[in-house]
Image: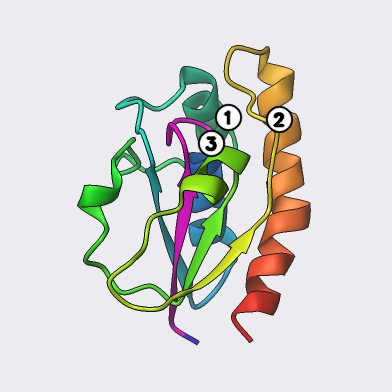
Amino acid sequence: MNKKVLILCTGNSCRSIIAEALINAKLDGISADSSGVRASGKVNPNAKKLLEEKGIWKEEYHSKTLDAVIDNDYDLIVTVCDHANETCPMFPKPIKKIHVGFEDPDGKGFEAFEETYKEIEEILLPRIIEALK
């Protein structure tokens, strides 16, 4: 299987970056990009620190707007926050979409990022595998 997934949220600084890294590290045959409806332009330092500790941080991970990925081909779009789900743009081609919401850890302590990572790994990854069958 060689599938491409786009993880979409509002700021593209925490949840979507964590999800992108987890998918790329743990799901064979599935690669991910992430972007934000209104990208913050920076990766949250706690998200980066956590991904570094887990050994799955890559320097190419960065906060980007939809313009950077809108022309890419995807097999699945995943929204991870309610705002992105409500404002998910129309893509040039029909693409399957799923929504799995996670609480935003931004502005909270490091433990909140660890909890978000765990939830994404345990809840989102199996949903993506299921959606791509």
| Mark positioned earlier in the residue sequence (1 or 2) | 1
92 inside magenta stretch = no
Question: Residue 44 location, x and y as percent?
Answer: 46, 22
User: Badge 1 is on which residue?
Assistant: 50
Q: CA distance from mark 1 to mark 2?
A: 7 Å
Tell me which amino acid carries mark 3: Leu
User: Residue type at mark 2?
Assistant: Glu
Q: CA distance from mark 3 to mark 2?
A: 10 Å
Percent from the top left, x then y, of residue 105? 64, 24
Residue 9 visible somewhere in the drawing: yes
Label 2 sits on residue: 114
Q: Which residues are magenta?
A: 2-14
For the C terminus, give its image quadrant: bottom right
Q: Position of residue 11 (x, y in %)?
A: 43, 31
- Decide if residue 72 is on the left or right side of residue 118: left
The three-letter amino acid code for the residue at tag 1 is Leu
- The span from disc 3 to disc 1 (Cα, nearest Å) is 4 Å
Q: Is residue 25 left or right of residue 109?
A: left
- Residue to which mark 3 is pinned: 51
Where 131 sits versus 119, above or below?
below
Q: Secondary structure at mark 2?
A: helix
Query: Could you tell me if the residues under marks 3 and 1 are in contact, i.e. CB atoms within 8 Å?
Result: yes
Q: Residues within 10 Å of mark 3 (few under 14, many from 20)?
A: many
